[in-house]
Image (cartoon, rainbow, N blue to C red):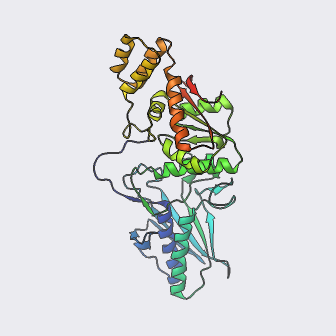
Amino acid sequence: MARKPKGTLRRGWTTGACATAAAKAAALRLLSGRFPDPVEIVLPRGERVAFALATEAAGAGWAEAGIVKDAGDDPDVTHGALVKARVAQAPAGAGIVFRAGEGVGTVTRPGLALAPGEPAINPVPRRMLTEALSELAARHGVPADFAVTVSIPGGEALARKTTNPRLGILGGLSILGTTGIVIPYSCASWIHSIQRGIDVARAAGLTHIAAATGRTSERAVQGLYGLEEAALIDMGDFAGGLLKYLRDRPVERLSLAGGFAKLAKLAQGHLDLHSGASAVDRAFLTAELKALGAPDALLAEAATANTAGQVLELARAQGLPLADRVALRARATALATLAGGTEVEVIVFDRDGAEVGRAGAA
């Protein structure tokens, strides 16, 4: 996760807001013969915002507009992407029908808010699109019977940088957004991905999932148990987001995997493992070493060590199971947050993916 820069950050717009604006512009062209530029839409919380059009096209019975997504100062993978919406006349009584164009994914697994086979245009963007087009149709005295095809050129390649393939959303990106606004570094999209990953795993009937702080620990725990992709949750620094969601949606077994420094923060009771939100306390690690019977010389070294990893190496050189003890304390934090219902193990891996500590199920 990128580090948040200092100072006031500029907000951006979700793909759902961009798709709604593009569709409204296309529908106006279809109904009135002209493209509005800029085009104004109403966001879910009532804000009115205007978007400049980047592309325009029209033909017999259809019109299409495109808007370049501006994510503000958020490190969003879709920043600068072209979000296009084609609106075509649909048969009488069809209502508003959604389709996935180039670069927009299709749902293939149960557990998400959309049924398998549906284009990955999430519920709030669908509502925004429906309200905007219904209002236009009413204003022009025609039925709101439209086929809306949303596309993001290059979206299939961008989607490989997201969790969509793991969630079973294939062929491209999702059209997202609950407010229409991207708050820089709010981490909402990452926590959303964690929650949807849990939903998909539960819907697939998986009883054992693994949540990891990074790719090395994820590969290691996957290899340890032969877990399928749908069982893997990219937790990152958001242990709290994972555990609180599982509290009401338990699974039979959870493996928490990560490096020593991250899991040492969880052992201290921190649920946000980012370095900017919590820091490993050398005094904490020194106290844990003391409880393991470490000699005074080792305790003095640990108290002045530069990193948590350095403390771990000092402990391992003395044959002291510090990583096991940290795993035990991290497991206690997880169990207290979950409040029952899920069997938990914590596995500590080093930078090479080798297991160095464990607590919980064998």
x, y percentage for residue 338?
56, 44
Residue at 45% x, 14% y is 293
x, y percentage for residue 188?
47, 52
Image: 47 above or below 11:
below
Counting every numbered tag in the picture gives 0
The answer to whether residue 88 shows anywhere in this view is yes
Residue at 50% x, 41% y is 239
| Residue 298 picture quarter | top left
Q: Is residue 125 left or right of residue 106?
A: left
Q: On the rendered image, what quadrant is the C terminus found in?
A: top right
Image: 335 above or below 68:
above
x, y percentage for residue 60?
60, 77
Residue at 47% x, 49% y is 77
Q: On the rendered image, what quadrant is the N terminus found in?
A: top left
x, y percentage for residue 91?
68, 79
Work out which residue is located at the far left of the displayed protein and give it.
7
Work out which residue is located at the far bottom of the displayed protein and give it.
141
Image: 362 above or below 40:
above
Q: Is residue 344 left or right of residue 351?
A: right
Q: Is residue 58 left or right of residue 108?
A: left
Of residues 214 and 102, the one drawn nearer to the viewer in this rendering:
214
The answer to whether residue 159 shows anywhere in this view is no
